[in-house]
Image: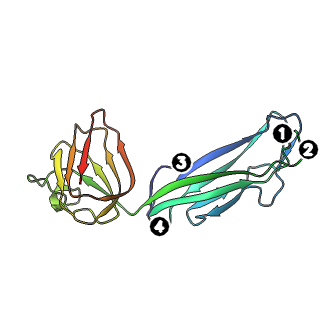
Amino acid sequence: MFNSQLVEGGSEIRTFTIANLGLVALNLTNAPKIQISGDTADFTVNQTATTSSVAPSLSTTFDITFDPASAGDKAATITIVNDDTDYGDGLLERPYVFTVTGIGLSGIKTWDGEGGSPYSWSTGANWEGDSPPGDGEALVFAGTQGSANSNDFSGYAFAGFTFSNTVGAFTLSGNAVDLTGHIVNDSANGQVVNLA
């Protein structure tokens, strides 16, 4: 649900709304009103603006911040205990529960292809900063050079691949990787990922 964020300096805030569509007040009956469990070092709830009672046709909000403390997949469970009885059985409705997720990234390396042929991933000059990516980093493919390149690392895991909006069609080939994140194509061009 949250975008991937760097462990060092990355964070994202999302606002959630609790709307009362009923005919009587909706009361949030626990303290704190919004409870969080799971990866609480990575997700925090700000409920200073959240009211305990929501009148019919009104709403209240709370914020959740994703600020990963370490790399990897993260998840937290959000629980909102309330007195909603919309099932028609006169019993209190179960708490409203949902899960938030995000991915913590240890770092990002950006391909520029300036190291020249053979356009291998271990050639530092093919990456911004002239050093190759490390295990666990997210890779961004940018620029116009070396669009056909090869992963010559063995046993590496990467936190995701992103093709920037400025690139043409890339073909990634070479050794297999463990991908712990997503492949994102911000380019208008199709991309080929053939790592086996």
Instruction: Tell which of 59 and 181 is nearer to you.
Output: 181
- Mark 4 to mark 1 CA distance (whole Å): 41 Å
Do the residues bearing badges 2 and 1 touch, measured as CB atoms within 8 Å? Answer: no
Query: Disc 2 marks which residue?
Result: 90
Q: Nearer the viewer, residue 150 or 130?
A: 150
Q: Position of residue 106 (x, y in %)?
A: 39, 64
**Amino acid at the residue labelled 3:** Met
Q: Secondary structure at mark 1?
A: loop
Q: Position of residue 154 (x, y in %)?
A: 23, 65
Task: Left or right? Give the position of 169 relative to 183.
Answer: left
User: SS class of the residue under badge 2?
Assistant: loop
Kind of residue indicated by mark 1: Asp
Determine whether 195 is above or below 40 in the image: above
Q: Secondary structure at mark 4?
A: loop
For label 1, the residue is: 86
Residue 59 point in image, percent of width and height: 76, 39
Cα separation between marks 4 and 3: 18 Å
- Residue at the disc numbered 3: 1
Q: Find the distance from the CA under tag 3 to the CA under tag 1.
A: 28 Å
